[in-house]
Image: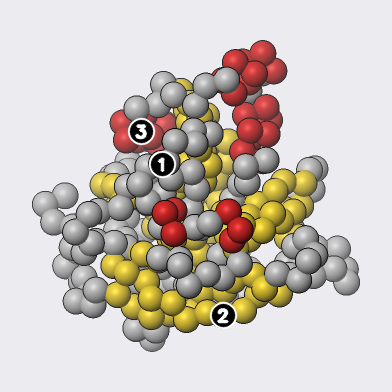
Amino acid sequence: MSSPFPATYPSNEFVEADLHYLVPNGRRPVNYAFPAPPGVPQNSGDFAARRVRIEDGRRQSQRPTLDVNGFELVEHPSQVADFSDESTIRSAYYVEVDALLRRVTGAIKVVIFDHTLRYGLKGHTEEGIREPVRRVHNDQTFVSGPRRVRDHLPPEEAEERLRGRFAIINVWRPIGHPVEATPLAMCDARSIDVQDLVPSDLVYRDKVGETYAFAYSDRHRWSYFPHVQPDEAVLLKIYDSLDDGRARLTAHSAFDDPRTSPNARPRRSIEVRSLVFF
């Protein structure tokens, strides 16, 4: 890409907006990945809006990277035109994501284990498509990260891979048109402290996973990439087994940009989740 700035790129270097943080109360939050049983809240836990400054990642003198900040914007044109077709996503788009992750990270093996389609229209009824998550979170924890390896590899290979370095990386991109509403905010990994992390249950129909919710800290430093294009992708570090000072995870959340035009199209996006081995 010749320029990091799309033609419609705004001039502001940051935006102030609300992000929703967990208010810890001593109880473990529980979130359901499917409609919760009658009388049970879809997402337990109390969340409160905090007004934060979200810097423009495109304009930072040092462009954010996976290993320093926990997130990175890359150019990534896709040959997939129809993201409504599940088989095409798995047969064609997964291949593109595999190649991208090998190129950016130097990985020797990539295992893509799922993906999620999102539509940023509140209350929509499109089956199998979720709304953007407007809570500060990370998709894995230091406990569930290694568990993912055992979930998706044969037992003998899993134990061998767990002795080396591996990471979990999400690849997020808009579908069809640039992001005009509900952009994605990401927290600089260097500003996160272990005391900010709150383990939470994520309940599936067949198992219970574990994610992190986040308690608010005024140390957190947030960034976003305005108007992400369909030929761009955002990489998010969800977990890294190597504890040597590099980013091991980040926090992220969709947010409502107060500058969004009333005529903005709701965001459509896809995120692909992968195990990456070195």
Q: Is residue 216 left or right of residue 154?
A: left
- Foreground of the two, 256 or 138: 138
Give x and y (percent) for residue 86: 54, 43
Q: Earlier in the sequence, mark 2 or mark 1?
A: 2
| Residue drawn at x 52%, y 79% as measured from the top left | 50
| Residue drawn at x 44%, y 36% as measured from the top left | 244
Tell me the quarter of the picture where residue 78 sits: top left
Give x and y (percent) for residue 190: 42, 54
- Foreground of the two, 278 or 113: 278
Judging by the rendered image, the residue that carries numbered circle 1 is 246
Q: Nearer the viewer, mark 3 or mark 1?
A: 1
Mark 1 surroundings: few (<14), some (14-19) or many (≥20) residues within 10 A = some
| Residue drawn at x 42%, y 41% as measured from the top left | 245
Whether residue 41 is visible to the viewer of this picture, yes or no, is yes
Q: Secondary structure at mark 2?
A: strand
Q: Which mark is residue 105?
A: 3
Q: Earlier in the sequence, mark 3 or mark 2?
A: 2
- Foreground of the two, 134 or 179: 134
Give x and y (percent) for residue 151: 68, 30
Above or below residue 123? Residue 30 is above
Whether residue 272 is visible to the viewer of this picture, yes or no, is no
Q: Is residue 18 left or right of residue 102?
A: right
Above or below residue 34? Residue 14 is below
Q: Are marks 3 and 1 in contact (CB under 8 Å)?
A: no
Question: Gap in Å between the C-alphas at discs 3 and 2?
Answer: 34 Å
Give amino acid for label 3. Answer: Thr
Give amino acid for label 1. Answer: Arg
Give amino acid for label 2. Answer: Ala
Judging by the rendered image, the residue that carries numbered circle 2 is 49
- Foreground of the two, 56 or 152: 56
Question: Gap in Å between the C-alphas at discs 2 and 1?
Answer: 29 Å
